[in-house]
Image (cartoon, rainbow, N blue to C red):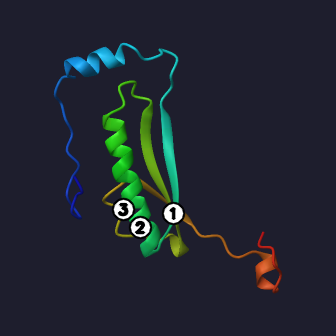
Amino acid sequence: KLLKRGQQHEKSNSAPKEDEQSASSKCNGNLKPFHMILTAQDNTYQAWQSRIMYYHFKKQRALDPCKVMGGFTRMLNSPGKRADSLMDEMPTVIVGALDGGSGCLHGGDTCD
């Protein structure tokens, strides 16, 4: 279910179903949760990609009996560390955009 802007994500407090309990009993006890980090720039195309990725991350995490899919963070590369419209939809950390580097500034083909 896609959420409208400003709509909150629902949290379920219900007990696991019987088939979920049997699936989780088959999990390896040595598995450690991982955290997904998505890098994105502040543009329309990557905003769309971010929405789709976060939607599918949540969908797969709900189906994950071993609970190895931990968290999700979108790392937004934004000039001037500007917030964007997805800040309320998914966990996001803003990082400032780097400049082009000396190679780019002087007409070179390498940007450091």
How far from the left and from the top, in percent, is residue 5?
A: 24, 64
Taking the image as shown, residue 62 lies to the left or right of residue 16, namely right
Q: CA distance from mark 3 to mark 2?
A: 11 Å
How far from the left and from the top, in percent, is residue 66?
A: 40, 24
The answer to whether the residue labelled 1 contacts the one labelled 2, judged by CB atoms less than 8 Å apart, is: yes
How far from the left and from the top, in percent, is residue 105?
A: 77, 84
Q: Is residue 55 above or below residue 84?
A: above
Q: Specify few, some or many for label 2: CA neighbours under 10 Å numbering under 14, 14-19, or 20 or more.
A: some
Q: Give the residue at mark 1.
A: 40
Q: Specify few, some or many for label 1: CA neighbours under 10 Å numbering under 14, 14-19, or 20 or more.
A: some
Q: Give the residue at mark 3.
A: 87
Q: Is residue 36 above or below residue 64?
A: below
Corner quadrant of residue 49: bottom left
Corner quadrant of residue 18: top left
Q: Specify few, some or many for label 3: CA neighbours under 10 Å numbering under 14, 14-19, or 20 or more.
A: some
Q: Residue furthest left?
A: 14
Q: Is residue 63 above or below residue 1?
A: above
Q: CA distance from mark 1 to mark 2?
A: 8 Å
Element at badge 1?
strand
Which dot, 1 or 3, sits closer to the camera?
Answer: 1
Nearer-N-terminus badge (3/2): 2
